[in-house]
Amino acid sequence: MSAPVLFSLSKDDPAGPALGKLIGADRGEIEVRRFPDGETYLRYGTEVKGRSVILFCTLDRPDEKILPLLFAAATARELGAMQVGLVAPYLAYMRQDRRFHDGEAVTSARFAKILSEQVDWLVTVDPHLHRRGSLGEIYGIPAVAVHAAPLISKWIARMVSKPLLIGPDQESEQWVASVAQAISAPHVILEKVRRGDREVEVSLPAIERWRDRTPVLVDDIVSTARTMIETVRHLKRVGLSQPVCIAVHGVFAGEAYRELLAAGAARVVSTNTIPHESNEIDVAPLLAEGVRTVTKPGLPA
Amino acid sequence: MSAPVLFSLSKDDPAGPALGKLIGADRGEIEVRRFPDGETYLRYGTEVKGRSVILFCTLDRPDEKILPLLFAAATARELGAMQVGLVAPYLAYMRQDRRFHDGEAVTSARFAKILSEQVDWLVTVDPHLHRRGSLGEIYGIPAVAVHAAPLISKWIARMVSKPLLIGPDQESEQWVASVAQAISAPHVILEKVRRGDREVEVSLPAIERWRDRTPVLVDDIVSTARTMIETVRHLKRVGLSQPVCIAVHGVFAGEAYRELLAAGAARVVSTNTIPHESNEIDVAPLLAEGVRTVTKPGLPA
């Protein structure tokens, strides 16, 4: 059987080629460009017939990326690919997983359905699973989520002395606790009240006793960074040292990254699930592990 | 049976409400917005259960519009809509209707398939049917194309004295001839050589004999406007008067509109299939006729 062939739709994203090398995939050539009128042109430059195709496409800004991805998947199939898998280090549309108000689109389920109809399997990093236990409850295809927590623990152990981990909410407690435990650091959880998409208020109970520690704020997705910015300010007010901020997925909408630095973060760090200047932690080895798991014969759907 | 309900996804597009009035549809409320991270939020504010839903969404910039449209269609169905139709005054992805080179995505067929799976019928204005005879060859649902030619003829008859119609290529000859014939005006067809997406060379055989006429350039889609700009310059060189430029679909990529005016067009006019300051010709009555045709009981698929 020939080696799989990996096509990177996330142009200029070094994680694609890095993953390809780790799993022994050939690097496929694909041309994806926009016509002046906004339509996509897509062309495979490498033969896919009879081969196992891996599409690499991280899904921040999903609305503008979905058509090129669907075109790529369908075309690979038309051209005779044996199977078409998707590695999306960041997976979008994980929040709206039910109708919170009458008439709302359940975009999470719908987005999953659209992808599931076009690819045979999916690998991603730490999807934002709110009320769901696993990706398999949403995606109708073999789907593997790999976890960045061990890499984050290692990075903190190497780079931060006497860390105090701070998690953004109750939902994240288990995750933050495991990152902290792996490096025998203490952790606390924010009390937070969200007011709309951009406004948030935070407080940290009895934080003063940790004055000798370096605060390390961790979150799975940092988008507007409102929570982190508020927390950085709160820590300053109560007299703790400048915190390190770590995101698994650094979405950083608009000016969020600059604002977070300006608010007083000592450092802002992310994994490379979304290419960004803050990337410090490489998830390619995790993705490779995910691809090996999902393509292992006999994996249950 | 209750009246159909029309939801406009093309916000601020006056053609949606105008169409609604003409066909006696109720105006539905729908909220469509982007989260800061680029994901779409969508919510129906008007009950759709048991009703005939019409989605109004013109499809210029299709890549960023497709997910909101698919979410709207699927959600209407989940909420119990009896049927979901789509009025897309401009229909994208009509060009790449076969593999011109190995490995290319046939985006025309794929886009049609994606839409056909989510809506029950489609109405559009003058789709760019290259080598295809009808929309039905591409779309697997009842699809009606209405034609702007009579409206364009009327506009020219009212606004331009002694017009000479100029069509961009052999493909358009039949269409241009019918516009010209309706107002007893002469017409000529450009000889044109396209060099890439943006470059084009034109010539007009024996154009000098039409010096007493007002040239009227007509095309179905004006995107980069390269052909029109070259033609305007050519007409100037051979001493004809400043032409009027008419597009059915004024896509006007980037600075195309300003450039066309700067090149010497006396006036640039379009129908309102895509909202633009050049809109002068209202297609709402055509769309109404299309909706009546497509929703007539017994229409063959």
Image (cartoon, coloured by chain):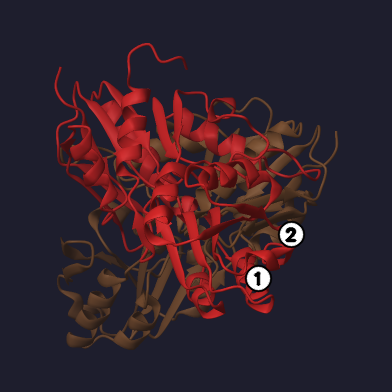
Chain colours: A red, B brown
Which quarter shows the C terminus of chain B? top right
What's the chain of the residue with tag 2? Answer: A
Q: Residue furthest top?
A: A298
Q: Which residue corresponds to the image point at 37% horizontal and 67% vertical from the top-left? A: B218
Pick whichever, A275 or B25, lies toward us: A275
The numbered disc on residue A192 is: 2
Number of numbered discs overlaid on the protein picture: 2
Location of residue B217 (image quadrant) = bottom left
* Vertical order, A128 against A35 (above or below): above
Residue indicated by mark 1: A230
| Nearest to the observer: residue B78 or residue B224 | B78
Q: Earlier in the sequence, mark 1 or mark 2?
A: 2
**Amino acid type assigned to the residue bearing label 1 in the image:** Glu
Give the x, y percent position of residue B106.
30, 38
Q: Quadrant of residue A268?
A: bottom left
User: Residue A256: x and y, percent?
Assistant: 53, 70
Q: Residue at x 59, y 44 (%)?
A: A177
Q: Are marks 1 and 2 in contact (CB under 8 Å)?
A: yes
The quadrant where residue B239 appears: bottom left
Residue B201, position as x, y percentages in the image? 15, 70
Q: Residues within 10 Å of mark 1 (few under 14, many from 20)?
A: some
